[in-house]
Amino acid sequence: MSKNRPSKSEFVNGIHAGNRLILSKAITLIESDLNEDKAFAQEILEEISLNKTNSVRIGITGAPGAGKSTLIEALGVYLTQLNKKVAVIAIDPTSSFSKGSILGDKTRMEQLANSELAFIRPSPSKEYLGGTNEVSKETILLCEAAGYEVIIVETVGVGQSEIMVSNLVDYFLLLHLAGSGDELQGIKKGILEHADKILVTKADGNNIPLAEAAKIALENGLHYSDKNKISVETISSHDIDSIANLWKNIESDITKLKKSGSFTQTRGQQDIKWINELLKRKLIVDFFNNDETISNINKANKEIGEGKISIYNAVNQILNKRKNL
Ligand SMILES: Nc1nc2c(ncn2[C@@H]2O[C@H](COP(=O)(O)OP(=O)(O)OP(=O)(O)O)[C@@H](O)[C@H]2O)c(=O)[nH]1
Ligand SMILES: [Mg+2]
C-alpha cells in the first residue's frame, strides 16, 4: 500500500466533508483484493455514519444500447439542477477486458461528470465466485456518508448482476428498447420479479409509435401478479419533460413505499442478505487460505489420482479434518 495513503481520520473527515477524491480512494480500498486494504476499509466504515434513509437508491438495468447511460446523464443533470447530489455507480462487464466501454460512458455522461454535485464511479466487474459482478453495499453507504442523496447503480442486463443490484437498491428500473413482435420475450423472466418500472426508451421522433406500441404490448403481456407492481412508461432522454416526469413518478412511488413501511422493511431484508453474503465470502476465503486445508486438498488430489479414494469421500474428509482444526 502506498506510503502517501490518507490516514483513517483523513478518510473519515474527507468522506464526511464530501471530498470526492477521498471517497474514490475509500471505494478502491473496498474493491481491493488485498486483505490489508479490506481491513483498513472496514476500520473506516466503523467510524462513518451509515444508513441514511433520506437517500434514494435506484438501480437501472437494460440490454446493451438500451439507453442506460444517456438516461442516467439526463436524469443526473436534471437532479443536480434541483441541487441534489447524485452518485452513479456503473458496473461494466466489459471493463475487465477493455477500458473501451468505461471511456464511452464517461463521454456519454460528460455534462454530469463536470457537475460539482455528481460523483461517477465505474466499478470493475470481477468474476466473483461463479461470475457475479460485484458491487459492494459499502460503496453505496460511503457515497451516502459523503452526502449523495440519489445513488444510481447501472448494470447491463446480462448475467446475474441485475439480481444482485436489486438487493442493493430501493427502486429498480428496467430499460427496454422497443422491438417488434413479442416484447416480453425480450425480457428475462428473472428481472421482472425485481423491477418496479419498465421504461420503453428512445420514445422520440419517428420512434414514438413503435415505443407506444411496445408499452401497450408489455402492459398486456405482464402477468396479473406483476401488473400491480410494475408500471410501464415510455421515455425519451432527449426530452426534459419526460425526465422531469420520470423523477416525479419515482418520488411519488418512494413516498408510497415509505408510508406503507415497505421501504424500511426492504432495506432491513437487504441488510440480512448482505450479512449472509459477507459471511459466505469470508468463510470461503478463510477456508481456502488455511495451510493445513491446502495440504489436505493436495493430498486428497493425489489419492484420488491413485484410485485410493473417491472425490466424494475426499471432500468429506477434508471438511471433517477442518472441523477438528
Ligand atoms: N433518439 C434517442 N436516442 C437515444 C436515447 N437514449 C439513448 N440514445 C442513443 O442510443 C445509443 C445507446 O445509448 P446508451 O445510453 O449508450 O445505451 P447503454 O444502455 O448505456 O449502452 P451500453 O453502455 O453499451 O450497455 C446512443 O447512440 C444514444 O445516443 C433517446 O432517448 N432517444
Ligand atoms: Mg452504458
Image (tube, rainbow, N blue to C red):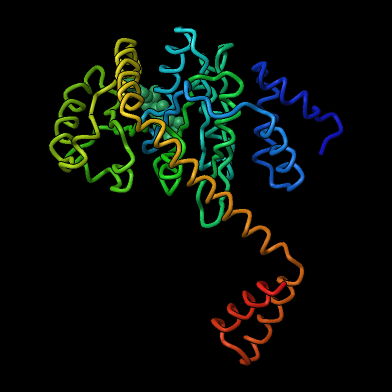
Q: Position of residue 271 (x, y in %)?
A: 50, 41
Q: Quadrant of the C terminus?
A: bottom right
Left or right, 68 with respect to 303, comes to: left
Residue at 43% from the left image edge and 42% from the top image edge = 269
Residue at 48% from the left image edge and 25% from the top image edge = 53
Left or right, 174 with respect to 42, comes to: left
Residue 34, above or below 319: above
Residue 66, above or below 145: below
Q: Quadrant of the N terminus?
A: top right
Res 45 → quadrant = top right
Q: Position of residue 315 (x, y in %)?
A: 59, 77
Q: Nearer the viewer, residue 22 or 42?
A: 42
Residue at 30% from the left image edge and 43% from the top image edge = 193
Residue at 73% from the left image edge and 26% from the top image edge = 11
Res 256 → quadrant = top left
Q: Position of residue 241 (x, y in %)?
A: 30, 10
Residue 290, above or below 205: below
Q: Nearer the viewer, residue 104 or 36?
A: 36
